[in-house]
Amino acid sequence: MPIRLPPDLMVSVSGFRGRVGAGVTPELFAGLAAAYGSFLQAEGYGNHVVIGRDSRTSGPMLARAAVAGLLSVGCRVTELGIVPTPTLMLAVRDTGAAGGLGVTASHNPAEWNALKFAVKGGTFLPPDRMERFQALVRGEDPGRAPWDRIATPTRDDSWPQRHLERILDLPFLNLDRIRAGRIPVALDCVNGAGGVIMPELLARLGCEVHGTGLEPDGRFPRDPEPTAANLSGLGDLVTASRARIGLAVDPDADRLSLVDERGRALGEDLTLALAADVVLARRPGAVVTNLSTSRVLDDVAAKHGCRVIRAPVGEINVVVRMMAEEAVVGGEGNGGVIVPALHNTRDAPVGAALLLQYLADEPGVPLSERIARLPSYKIVKEKVSFPRDRLDDAYAALVRDLPPGDSDGSDGLRLEWPAEASWLHVRPSGTEPVVRLIAEAREPASARALVDGARGTLQTVAGA
């Protein structure tokens, strides 16, 4: 029988996610994993699958279900336990596995969980293959392995340490310079998977670590998305410990947010810009990011004589474009840093190492002072409920209601006004049942006006 997908399950290029006990059940994860194992074998990639999870309390239950599904179709399974998503992706690449499964809902609240799909080489399932996989999921039940072809899963706990060593080997890092600064750092892992690598990474870089939420038990003490609004506690820890920087990761440690030495949350958008500054100073080249990322990245790239190329939102969309452009750095404005010299996936630990190099490059200069040298923009982000079947009407209304600008329809609608250094992006979320409104301008009031105007247009369309 085909898998019956719950109506409230979020299905996108980012995987399948929903609330545990409602849309998300062990039966669903076992079925999806069986379908994926069958899919990998049918496409000729082999039957070895690596699986890891974040620290959510539903993780053991759902990971075991996924393992059972994989074994049932004849896969060989290597379990990593609690690991950051970038650690899982590194393991998929370096073991030569046919693919991988991540049991993680990333930044979503604790009642959510999800299944993410990696392919050989350590990237997420590209959009065209995701379409084929979804068709398989909605088709017939995959064939099951006979009793004498069911393997015993193996366990490998070495990958956080291997990940750490790969980061320390990067040519962009001057380890002696970083360690000489004995940089005091405040760290918030929100009791997620970052706790298995971030404290040791910082210690290996000679940092004086002041931590909170380091125990990976899945009991998130705050909203786990590392937005500026959720980092007041980290700001307090920064000022109390006299740290030079605060670092916050999401539950699967693929996103990194920053707090300056005054305890001021900087938002996620500066993470990629500052990390790119370190990389481009040492290896100039193309930069790729998504359509919702701050233009401060363009300013940093221009300083090094480099160009920024934009792709639709979604890590795999950025990665595919990075590989095509042979980019040296890229990522997303949500705090996701991708360094191909390490691997092609968002990686908060590598972002943290690059930020420490950023501080070490000017050891006597506070982070706030260095950021003050950059052009200043205000970015406003909101989520609104809106019927997705009316989005085309909404995009047409926005084009009609707003001043003429450069238009990009590859991912929702993005309108840009270069002369005013402002833009608006309206798109359906791939991880939540909402529509995202994102605007940026030099002045806060201008960015706010763009979001408010877009919200008003959507309300008018929805009510028509």
Image (spheres, helix red, strand yellow):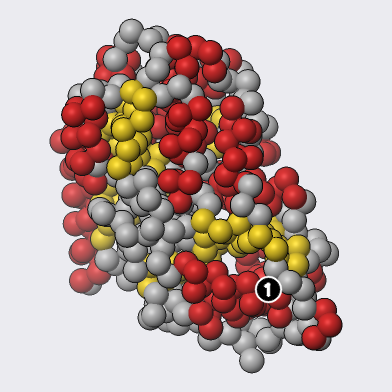
Quadrant of the rendered image containing residue 319: top right
Q: Quarter of the image containing the N terminus? A: bottom right
179, above or below 393, in the image: above
The residue nearer to you, when weighing 264 against 290, is: 264
Task: Name the residue at 64% across, 40% down.
Answer: 162
State left or right for residue 80 relative to residue 361.
right
**358, above or below 254, in the image:** above
Q: Quick one: which residue is furthest to the bottom in this view?
A: 1
Residue 281 visible, this angle: yes
> Which residue lies at the image location 49% right of the left edge and 69% below the top edge?
60
Camera-side residue: 84 or 317? 84
Q: Is residue 73 left or right of residue 7?
A: right
Q: Quadrant of the C terminus?
A: bottom left
Above or below, 9 against 84 in this view is below
Q: Residues within 10 Å of mark 1 (few under 14, many from 20)?
A: many
Q: Residue furthest left?
A: 445
* Label 1 residue SS: helix
Q: Position of residue 204 (x, y in %)?
A: 50, 27
Relative placement, left or right, of 234 versus 86 is: left
Q: Residue at x 58, y 84 (%)?
A: 3
Residue at image mark 1: 70
Where residue 457 sits: x, y (%)?
23, 57
The picture places residue 341, in percent across and down from the top left corner, at: 65, 31
How many numbered discs? 1
Residue 31: x and y in percent read 60, 80
Snapshot quadrant of residue 156? bottom right
Please determine whether, in this image, residue 133 is positioned above or below residue 332. below
Q: Amino acid at mark 1?
A: Leu
**Rendered residue at 47%/67% (across/down):** 59
Residue 336 in view in this figure: no
Q: Which sits in the foreground, 170 or 463? A: 170
